[in-house]
Structure formats: C-alpha cells, structure tokens
Image (cartoon, helix red, strand yellow):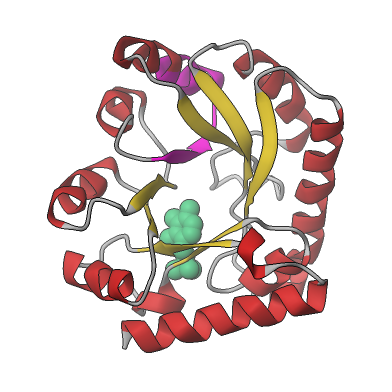
Amino acid sequence: MVQEQLREVRERIAAACRRAGRDPKDVTLIAVSKTKPAQMVQEAYEAGARDFGENKVQEILEKKPVLPQDIRWHMIGHLQRNKVHQVLGQAVLIHSVDSLRLAQQIETEAEKKGIEAEILLEVNVAREESKFGFFLEETEEAIRQIAKLPHVHIRGLMTIAPFVENPEENRGIFQKLYQFSVDIAAKNIDNVTMDVLSMGMSNDFEVAIEEGATMVRVGTSIFGAR
Ligand SMILES: *Cc1c(COP(=O)(O)O)cnc(C)c1O
C-alpha cells in the first residue's frame, strides 16, 4: 500500500512539475512518517524514498538506529531548545527554526559538536495564531541576525499553510513566500543560501510545486491517515 501511494504521489509531483515547466529533480519529496512504525518507513525506503520527516526528536532517535543508515531525516516540527543537542547530527536539516533563541541554542550546540547546522526559517505567512514561525515582515531581520552565527547555515524557508478545503486558497501564500525568498537571495547575505523552499503537504503540494517549492512534506497521502 505504501509503495502504491508513494508511486502515485511521485506521479502527481511529476505532473505538477510539467505544468510549471520545472524539472522533477528540483523537488525533493519528504515522506512524513510521524506516528507511523519503522516497518512502514522501511517499505517506503524499498520503494526508493530516502528523505523522511518527523516532528518529534524522540521519534527520529527511535527510528534512525533500526532503519537504513542512508536515510536523511528531516526535523519538521516545533523544536524545543532543550532537545537541540539530541537532534543535531541526527537530522540533516531542521525546517522549523522559529525564534532567535532557538537559533542561538543551535549555534551553541553545533559549536560544541564541531559541526555546521543546516536550517530553514519557519515563516507563518498566513499569521495563524495556532502556528509557530516568524511573520513575513520579521523574517529578513531574523535572517540577518541568524546569518551571523558561524555554526548555523540558513538554507532557505519553510511554511505550513492553513488547512483549507480547496488547495487553490493557499496559492497566494506560496507565491508570497517564493517571492520573498527570491528577494532575499538577491540581497546576497553572507552565510545565507536561499536554495530550499519547504512548502506543501498532502492537501496542497501540487499548488506549492507550481509556485516554486523545492521540498514538499507529504505524510497522509503516502502513509494513510494518522
Ligand atoms: C504532519 C506534517 C506534514 C505532513 O502532513 P500531511 O497532511 O499528512 O501530508 C507536513 N509538515 C509538517 C510540519 C507536519 O507536521
């Protein structure tokens, strides 16, 4: 079942890329395996998936040792500062940096470990009260502050769009974040590479791809309802 659904999601990604005149190689599918057992991750792995997303540090730490070591784990959920030391070096990319204090903590722990942490800034484009992330108008200043941290490397931006019936309703959100990332890239800020735009989930990943997503985070459409 996982293999079949994965194939279908890949086909939908390819079709969205064709519509947008984009190369499917420029869109990374992150299979969001939160709450799902390692066995299902293994099935997706056997069907070719290598990038997996989790929203809890604990779940990465539990699954990683029992699954193939070439899996790239992505931390996509809200990260507490006291968990930073556990996730650094385990996840290849932290998508959910939503405060300066969290970035500072990542700097401290990355320096201790002698590594450079790859991160995205989470942007609450729709200004939803229930969501984490910087408001759009705060984001450039946050980028400039975080760019000064020598062991933290900003790779781009992430957003969780609102849950809507019709994914078209989120098109404007994705357009805004894409345009913002182009504007930031043009400013050539030291230690900032705007090459990742993590946006789009089961409900709206095709629209996100049409609007420039380079990573889509898809759970339910691959692994079923949680
Ligand atoms: C759960 C989750 C997803 C995947 O959501 P689906 O609707 O199941 O595809 C994507 N991004 C984040 C941050 C999540 O927490």
Where residue 69 sits in the image (x, y, percent)? 23, 51
Task: Say which residue appears at 68% left-offset and 42% top-offset.
Answer: 195
- 188 lies left or right of 202: right
Where residue 50 sits in the image (x, y, percent)? 38, 60
Observer-nearest of 169 and 83: 83
User: Which quarter of the rendering shows the N terminus?
Assistant: bottom left
- 97 lies left or right of 81: right
Task: Say which residue appears at 60% left-offset and 29% top-offset.
Answer: 154
**Relative vertical location of residue 3 with respect to residue 72 in this rendering, above or below:** below
- 179 lies left or right of 129: right
Where residue 200 sits in the image (x, y, percent)? 61, 63
Observer-nearest of 102 and 154: 154
Please give the range of residues in magenta. 92-106
**Relative vertical location of residue 99 with respect to residue 47 in this rendering, above or below:** above
In the rendered image, residue 93 lying in the magenta stretch gets the answer: yes
Quadrant position of residue 149: top right
Quadrant position of residue 5: bottom left
Residue 38 in view of the camera: yes
User: Which quarter of the rendering shows the C terminus?
Assistant: bottom left
How many marks overall?
0
**Relative vertical location of residue 177 with respect to residue 214 in this rendering, above or below:** above
Task: Say which residue appears at 80% left-offset and 33% top-offset.
Answer: 185
Residue 162 in view of the camera: no
Where residue 168 sits in the image (x, y, percent)? 76, 74
In the rendered image, residue 133 lying in the magenta stretch gets the answer: no
Observer-nearest of 11 and 23: 23
Observer-nearest of 37 and 101: 37
- 19 lies left or right of 147: right
Quadrant position of residue 189: top right
